[in-house]
Each structure stands twice: as structure tokens, then as C-alpha cells.
Amino acid sequence: MGDTSVFASVLLPIALALIMASLGLSLTLADFRRIITEPRGVLIGLANLLVVSPLLAFAVAELYGLEAAFAVGLVLLGASPGGTLANLLTHLARGDTALSISMTALSSVAAVVTVPLFLTLAVDHFGASVADDVSMLGVVVRVFLITLVPLAIGMRLRALDPARAAAAEPRAKRVALVVFLFVVAGAVANEWDTITDHIGELALAALTLNVAAMTVSFTVSRIARLSNRQATAVAMELGIHNATLAIAVAVSIADVLAIPAAVYSAFMFLTAGTFARVMWHRNGAAPTPAPAQA
């Protein structure tokens, strides 16, 4: 990885750990139990996030004929779990915030399996030259250490002192946002020449995946008779991925794999923000149900 080795091996894992710990501060066991107590919305949301999203990434990569490395990077992004900022935008859109938090939490846990799985399938399907550098066991261990461990630490801190955790959560989320922007900026800077050489195809592919994922997931959710607020949460999860995780995994293999996630990040807030504004009006002025407490 050359001059990006410090960024990839030290700064990215720290950044992602901070983001996941901030998520943990907002979680209780009730968020994980919701798959049992309110299974319909959670299962439909997870099916969209864990199956539909990566398959759409495969389709978009084929549609635009992306180079193998870019195609793998796009699938890696599509297979990444929902991001913590999806919870905030869901709240602002008057969506089902509790459902959003549950999907983020559960998909973050599932990422230990789904991210390596779809990464393997993408490398095999597109014949990327990075195949020899991919250690699936290494990816599994890396995802576990930089997602589940800090997530568990954040949840433990909340369980020990809920009041302090609640007070610290807003600041932690602001720090997480700054860290996220730093990570994306670093990924872009590291591969600036490559990005500028391929900005057209990457921008179109990223924007297409973002809009398609949000549109398909919202439509499927409504067909499955979820409410507008639930469908808002599902669509937002597919629109705002944990791009930091995708970038962290990507640069541990080859820097070029991180480019689609970095480019996607430039669009996702614009489209998701527009969607949030539309749904804010549609979902009405009634308060969003608060996340259940353990």
C-alpha cells in the first residue's frame, strides 16, 4: 500500500472504531430483541440491506462495465451495513428511528459474514487482479475487531452508566461525523489521480446505485405493507452505508478498491438529504416512536 500504509493500518481502524463505539452508546439489548418482538419490519429491512443492496451493486457494475477493481469496490460498498448517520437522517425525516437503529445494529453484526462473502463473490465474478491479496480470514478478523468490539464497548458503557452515555452520545456522533469526513477525504486524496481519470463512470455508477437502492427498498417495503415511516427507515439504511467500513476493508487489500466508496460518499448525503426532506412532509408532524430502552 506504499505511502498510504499508515492511513490504512492505523488511522482508518481508529476512525471506524470511534464511529462504531458512538453507535454502541445509543444501543440497548432491546434494539437486538426487536427482530423477535417486531420481526416484520426488521426482516424486510435486513433483506433489502443484506441481499438486495449488494445484488444491485453487482448489476450496476455490470451496467456501466466498470473495471474489475472498481466493480469489486462497488460491491464491497453495497454489502456494507447501514451507517450511523442513517439513524439521524431517518429521525429528521420523521421515519421509524427505532427500526433504523435496529437495522444498523444487526447489519453491523452481520457484516462479519456478509462483507467477506460478497467480497469473495465479487472478486471471483469480476476476476479482479487483487484476488491473490485477499485473505478472507483476515477480512473476517478485521471486520470483527473494528466493528463488533467497539460496538460492544459502547453498549457496555451505556449499560454501566446510561445517563452519562446519553449525555456523551451527541458529542460522540459529531466526532464520528468529523472522523467520517476525514476518512473520505483521505481516501480521495490517496487516489486522486485515479479518481479524476475515471470520475465520469464512477460518479454515474455511484449515483445510480444510491438512487436505485433507495427506490427499490422503499417500493419493496411499501408493497410488503410497511408504513411510510418504516419504509423511510429502510430506504435510508440503503442510501447511507457505512462507507468507512468499506474503505477500511478496501485499503487493507488494495487502495483502488476504496475509490467507489469514497465517490459514493460524495453523493449519498445529497440524495438522502433530499429524500429526508420529502419524507418529512409525507410522514406528517407526529413524533417518531422513540427507540425502546432495555
Image: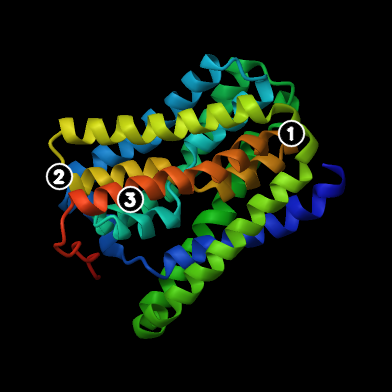
If you read the primary sequence from the N terminus, does the residue marked by circle 2 or circle 1 appear first? 1
Circle 2 or circle 1, nearest the eye:
1
Q: Based on the displayed image, in which of its 4 quarters is residue 50 positioned?
A: top left
Q: Identity of the amino acid at label 3?
A: Ala
> Residue at 57% across / 45% down in the picture?
266
**Quarter where residue 246 is shown:** top right
Instruction: Tell me the kind of residue under disc 2.
Output: Ser
Question: Looking at the image, which is closer to me, 267 or 144?
Answer: 267
Residue 61 sits in which quadrant?
top right
| Left or right, 185 with reference to 237 | right
Is residue 110 depicted above or below 59 in this figure? below
The CA span between labels 3 and 1 is 30 Å
For the residue labelled by badge 1, is the local secondary structure a helix, a strand or a loop?
A: helix
State the mark number for residue 196. 1
Say which amino acid is labelled 1.
Answer: Thr
> Disc number at residue 276?
3
Quadrant assignment for the N terminus:
top right
Query: Mark 2 — residue?
Result: 227
Indicate which disc, 3 or 1, sits on the residue closer to the N terminus. 1
